[in-house]
Image (spheres, grey):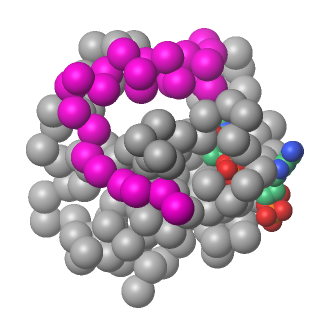
């Protein structure tokens, strides 16, 4: 059973370690993560099991917009394939709906099969492709879902 809570600045080191491990050269810098934790227009949510952080997601909201952005989603290495990513998605969509958002949008590397499977299974469709979006030249796919 996962529990969810907002990330705090005291979680920064733990989050940064996961971020580097899971995103490598595309990882956010510590300063970016700090800003995201403090950002009032963001929801930086940690998922824990027995008080151990097992993943997180970041949602971005804009004033006067019904569109939310799933800015990041990660499950710790070794805990994949157990449905945690799915539970994070459900929680993210719930939060977006609570904020009265009707559309959720995200970017994903074209070669990130596991993430794409998760998003497709949850009803996300490819809206556009951005060539060479990532540092290594990989394309990004913009996927989105109408929530309500
Ligand atoms: C993408 C990510 C969040 C998925 O988390 P997860 O907990 O493994 O997700 P789930 O267990 O809910 O499974 C999601 C899908 O991954 C696939 N999957 C599961 N185990 C797998 C494995 N061992 N190998 C390959 N794919 C696998 C399955 O297709 C599953 O979909 P299905 O249930 O329809 O079969 C996780 O892999 C992750 O953190 N990756 C690194 C960071 C990242 O890429 N984030 C997304 C950025 S856009």
Query: In terms of image quadrants, where is residue 144?
Result: bottom right
Describe residue 17's horizontal placement relative to residue 122 as left or right: left
Give the quadrant of the C terminus. bottom left
Outermost residue on the bottom side: it is 148
Whether residue 137 is visible here, answered yes or no, is yes
Describe residue 99's horizontal placement relative to residue 97 as left or right: left
Vertically, is 130 above or below 9? below
Q: Nearer the viewer, residue 62 or 34?
A: 34
In magenta segment, residue 141: no
Describe residue 100's horizontal placement relative to residue 53 as left or right: left
Query: In terms of image quadrants, where is residue 138?
Result: top right
| x then y, percent, for residue 96 | 33, 67
Q: Main secondary structure of the magenta part?
A: helix
Report the number of numbered marks: 0
In magenta segment, residue 5: yes
Q: Residue at x 32, y 67 (%)?
A: 95
Q: Residue at x 53, y 24 (%)?
A: 18
Describe residue 15's horizontal placement relative to residue 22 as left or right: left
Vertically, is 87 above or below 106? below
Vertically, is 81 above or below 14? below
Q: Which residues are magenta?
A: 1-27
Q: Residue at x 69, y 41 (%)?
A: 79
| x then y, percent, for residue 127 | 60, 61
Whether residue 131 is visible here, answered yes or no, is no
| x then y, percent, for residue 52 | 47, 37
Q: Residue at x 62, y 26 (%)?
A: 22
| x then y, percent, for residue 11 | 30, 26
Outermost residue on the front side: it is 50
């Amino acid at each position: 059973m996962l529990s969810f809570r907002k990330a705090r600045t005291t979680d920064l080191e733990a989050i940064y370690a996961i971020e580097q491990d899971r995103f490598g050269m595309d990882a956010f810098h510590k300063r970016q993560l700090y800003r995201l934790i403090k950002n009032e227009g963001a929801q930086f949510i940690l998922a824990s099991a027995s008080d151990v952080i097992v993943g997180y997601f970041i949602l971005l909201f804009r004033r006067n917009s019904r569109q939310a952005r799933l800015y990041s989603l990660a499950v710790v290495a070794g805990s994949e394939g157990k449905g945690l990513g799915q539970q994070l998605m459900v929680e993210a969509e719930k939060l977006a709906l609570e904020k009265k958002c009707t559309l959720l949008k995200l970017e994903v590397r074209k070669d990130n099969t596991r993430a794409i499977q998760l998003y497709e299974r949850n009803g996300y469709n490819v809206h556009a492709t951005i060539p060479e979006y990532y540092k290594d030249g990989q394309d990004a796919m913009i996927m989105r879902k109408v929530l309500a």
